[in-house]
Image (cartoon, rainbow, N blue to C red):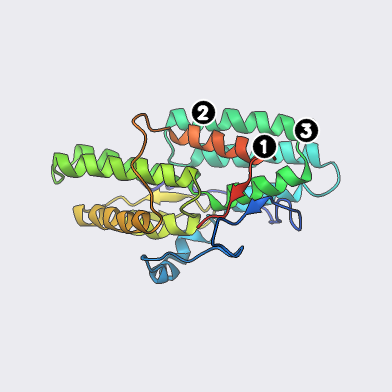
Amino acid sequence: MSKSKKRKKPPGVAAIGKNKVNDVQPKAGQTGQTAAPKDVSLGPACGVVFLLGGVVFAIIVSVSAYLLIGKQGERASSAIREQLIPWVDESELSVPDKARINERLMDLAADVEAGKVTDRQLGRLRTRLTQNPVLQWGVIDNTIALAQSSGEFTDAERRELQKISDRLLMASSEFKISMEELGFLVQKLATRDSQSGLLETRPEISHSDVITFMQRSEELMASREVGDPPENSPSVAQVFEKMINDALDESILLPLTK
């Protein structure tokens, strides 16, 4: 499933809303610092830095350079249209999710260009876009498709894998998992394109690789007290849209990623 096409390396980076107030409020018992997982050691995640070096969205962060200088509206909207949307197009997200996400990004670009997005909102967007793993969800969707088509998996395992995916997506919408933690969970399922930072599903994934992903996911979600997903689980695009809308709504206090 890996792509042979070489992607252009994103331009230089800066921080969206750097030195701005982000309206990120610690949850009860938090001190303002991101808390370490209780039960899941992320020590092994240090070994998957290769998955994450560009995954903190070099393209998204480069867009921010235009949000802070000069004719920010025109430049930022152009960067969203010419860099971020093509990045989403090259991801492994489903076609419907890509279409809906890019439609929302086009609306966001228009709002930025019209001067409707404040510095505080930019800071909140930066926090959401650089911490939330939802735009890399194609790897998980591909893994589910593999399990559905492979004779190595029992019906019970397929159902459990789908439930785990739904719970992880719910946890992502609630910011209970981070970009780094997703990289740890899918370590055996994906590689990272060195230029774009996109996660790419490994061409060969074994039954045991998927079971490892499921076990790690269960352990992480138990430590974060993630419950059962709703009967009608939201799509990746719906979670992304809610994330953007919450970031733009300054009346909503955004919790820290655990």
Give the number of the mark in front: 1 or 3: 1
Image coordinates of residue 171 in percent, x first then y, are: 43, 47
The numbered mark at residue 249 is: 1
Residue 166, picture quadrant:
top left
Q: Residue at x 36, y 58 (%)?
A: 220
Q: Residue at x 70, y 51 (%)?
A: 16
Q: Which residue is tagged 2?
A: 99
Q: Secondary structure at mark 1?
A: loop
Q: Secondary structure at mark 2?
A: helix
Image coordinates of residue 101 in percent, x first then y, are: 54, 32
Q: How many marks?
A: 3
Asked if disc 1 and disc 3 are in contact, CB closer than 8 Å, the reply is no
Depth check, front residue: 219 or 150: 219
Q: Quadrant of the N terminus?
A: top left
Asked if disc 2 and disc 1 are in contact, CB closer than 8 Å, the reply is no
Among the two numbered marks 2 and 3 on one chain, the one whose residue lies closer to the N terminus: 2
Q: CA distance from mark 2 to mark 3?
A: 23 Å
Q: Is residue 68 left or right of residue 182?
A: right
The numbered mark at residue 229 is: none
Residue type highlighted by circle 1: Asp
Q: Secondary structure at mark 3?
A: loop
Can the viewer see residue 10 in this picture? Answer: no
Q: Is residue 105 above or below residue 216?
A: above
Q: CA distance from mark 1 to mark 3?
A: 12 Å
Q: Which residue is tagged 3?
A: 116
Residue type highlighted by circle 2: Ala
**Circle 3 Cα neighbour tier, 10 Å, few/some/many (<14 / 14–19 / ≥20):** few
**Circle 1 Cα neighbour tier, 10 Å, few/some/many (<14 / 14–19 / ≥20):** few
